[in-house]
Image (tube, helix red, strand yellow):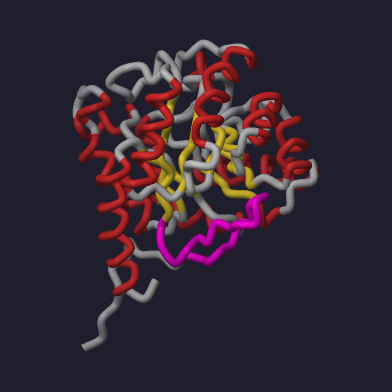
Amino acid sequence: MNREPIAALHPRKLFSVPLPDGRALDLGERTLVMGILNVTPDSFAEPGPRTDPARAAEDALRMEEDGADIVDVGGESTRPGAEPVSASEELGRVVPVLRRLRGRLRVPLSIDTYKAEVAEAALDEGAVIVNDISGLRYDPAIGRVAAARRAALVLMHTRGRSRAMYQEAVYAALVNEVIAELGESLEAAVAAGVPRERIVLDPGLGFAKHAGHSFELLAQLPDLTALDRPLLVGPSRKSFLKAALGDVPPGAREFGTAAAVAAAVLGGVHIVRVHAVREMCEVVRVADEIRKRAGR
């Protein structure tokens, strides 16, 4: 009897993304887990503010112990409706944490920022990845910083600013438009001097997208392989999950997050960005095992 793998499984291309410290992110054999370390007083998804640098550093080390392959440090909330903060305030939040982690954290550090000044300072303090939620649209100079410092660069799709992004959530052909706009960000980064091999793309679930848009992108992830770059997806605790779970708070969306993470892995993503590292590492290991058994 012929056995075909279930339709949800899609081939995943192998990539190696060089890092400036001589390491590389080897992507595709297994799914990497990026732990979210928000050091802000107003994160939508944390039970309480993580503003003490010593506590934040210990949380990062715990993420590594729990299985994180990357830790992503962010000093500004970019949830819908959030107000921007100055570069100096953002630096005051992230730099003390990065300094406490230097020489202690073994996995690569990522800085979640759209400001070139913050990215450069974080790279000085040991970060090796820049995670720009704006896809170079807010501060194009961040591309030149990443190029000069040979950092890996994550480019996310969004439209508009956090305080009014849902006004931009109008699409005639969602997946095609996201692909086209991510392609523009990719080409802007290359024009700024970032080698294509150092770039990772993120479709931006929940950013300038209503719930149905985010679910559609999860269902159509294989289409994004047209850009021939590794994919990162961050569904963790986001509000789009309420369309399926009901009006529950972020802390009650962990099982929904797990379902979205599993779908993303089966859809071919290379990195998932999550809050609950230990639990989502288990989800990823199971989903990867399914991929392995399907020969994908």
In the image shown, does 107 or 156 lie closer to the viewer?
Answer: 107
Q: Residue at x 45, y 14 (%)?
A: 81
Residue 131 coordinates in the image, percent (x, y): 57, 37
- Looking at the image, the residue that sits furthest to the bottom is 1
In the image shown, does 41 or 139 lie closer to the viewer?
Answer: 41
The answer to whether 5 appears left or right of 197 in the picture is left
Tell me which segment is drawn in magenta.
12-31
In reply to whether residue 20 is colored magenta, the answer given is yes
One can see residue 217 in this view:
no
Q: Residue at x 26, y 60 (%)?
A: 286
Residue 226 vertical position relative to residue 92 in the rendered view, above or below: below
In the image shown, does 101 or 279 lie closer to the viewer?
Answer: 101
Q: Residue at x 70, y 24 (%)?
A: 117
Q: Residue at x 41, y 35 (%)?
A: 36
Residue 92 vertical position relative to residue 149 in the rendered view, above or below: above
The answer to whether 133 appears left or right of 6 in the picture is right
Q: Main secondary structure of the magenta part?
A: loop
Residue 65 coordinates in the image, percent (x, y): 34, 46
* Quadrant location, the N terminus: bottom left
Residue 140 vertical position relative to residue 25 in the rendered view, above or below: above
Residue 101 coordinates in the image, percent (x, y): 50, 35
